Image (tube, rainbow, N blue to C red):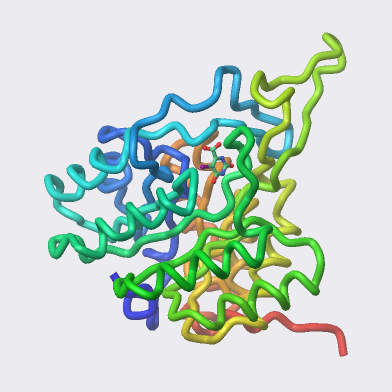
Amino acid sequence: VDLSAQIANMKVNNLFLNASGIHCQTEAELDDLMQEPVSGAMVTKSMTPQSRFGNPLPRYYRLANGSINSMGLPNEGFDYYMDYLKTHDQIKPVIVSVAGRSKEEDLAMLHTLQDDDSYQGLTELNLSCPNVIGEPQMAYDFPAANDLLKEVFSFYKKPLGIKLPPYFDLVHFDQIAELLNQYPLSHVNTINSIGNGLWIDVNSETVVLKPKGGFGGVGGSMVLPTALANVRGLRQRLNPSIKIIGTGGVTNGRDAFAHILCGAEMVSIGTQLYEEGLGAFERVTRELTDIMEAKGYELLADFRGKLKVIE
Ligand SMILES: O=C(O)c1[nH]c(=O)[nH]c(=O)c1I
């Protein structure tokens, strides 16, 4: 799938997809996403070469205005997802999310995808999982990320995007954009959860997650300002050929509209999708359509990236 081809003059109805990790680990969950009538694409849970249980429970907790998770990369393993693609009609594009625990694991999975002539899908290299115990987020280690991408693009010739963590300093927007602009990326998906947050139950004076002493990635409506900043900051800096999937904090049509104003070509829904169920796609799409009609916009391209600043 070439996102840009799918995106040209896209109307609202196929703008949305799930955030990786949400309702996308098992065959049954993937079938639900495939059959869901409104979303325009879907992404798998990030996968490793072998299946993983992930971190001990409790590892997800709902907050008043978001979520915190330390899942630890639970997934059914690379072959399971490859089999799924081979045995199911792709009614919509399925983005394959790859998150090796090491450079070697990333390269091994990408070599297999490159060498599999039957695989013509869009792949997303997740460089931003914050919850694998003892593993740093590659996307915060610019030299390591550059080494990995240089090696990846020496052999990988199919559409490939990158899942990024949030950055919090404009200099880092400059640095990651300069790094990514060297490569023929199909897209950047930003943001992943805000890594290593901490939530405390004051009554029991205890953390709410078991892994990592309670530290986990934060998502949901409270991360919207960070998500919008990263979509906007990267849109302003990345080559136009690199599309942006906006992820983070989308709970309604207004949030989705804001992501598109910042330059998002497609918009993921994560925490809200998990808490509300797949019906969130239809609700958010309807709300966005109503906003567009009220403003006189017919196409997403009518306002995409056209955020105004105060002169
Ligand atoms: O803990 C996880 O499985 C996880 N959790 C996240 O919030 N982002 C990620 O990329 C991953 I791979």
Residue drawn at (44%, 47%), measured in percent from left and top?
Answer: 100
Residue that protrudes farthest toward the top in the picture = 204
Along the horizontal axis of the image, is 286 left or right of 33? right
- Could you tell me residue 276's position as x and y percent? 51, 36
Quarter of the figure that contains the C terminus: bottom right
Residue drawn at (45%, 58%), measured in percent from left and top?
Answer: 125
Q: Quadrant of residue 60?
A: top right
Q: Look at the image and tell me whether residue 289 can be seen.
A: no
Residue drawn at (64%, 69%), measured in percent from left and top?
Answer: 231
Relative to 210, say whether 85 is above or below: below
Along the horizontal axis of the image, is 179 left or right of 105? right
Along the horizontal axis of the image, is 45 left or right of 179? left
Q: In which quarter of the image is ligand 1?
A: top right
State the residue in front, 97 or 301: 97
Relative to 116, say whether 33 is above or below: above
Q: Look at the image and tell me whether residue 173 can be seen.
A: yes
Residue drawn at (26%, 59%), measured in percent from left and top?
Answer: 113
- Could you tell me residue 144's position as x and y percent? 60, 62
Count of numbered labels shown in the rendering:
0
Quarter of the figure that contains the N terminus: bottom left
State the residue in front, 252 or 18: 18
Relative to 153, say whether 279 is above or below: above
State the residue in front, 239 or 292: 239
State the residue in front, 215 or 114: 114
- Could you tell me residue 74's position as x and y percent? 45, 32
- Could you tell me residue 54's position as x and y percent? 49, 27
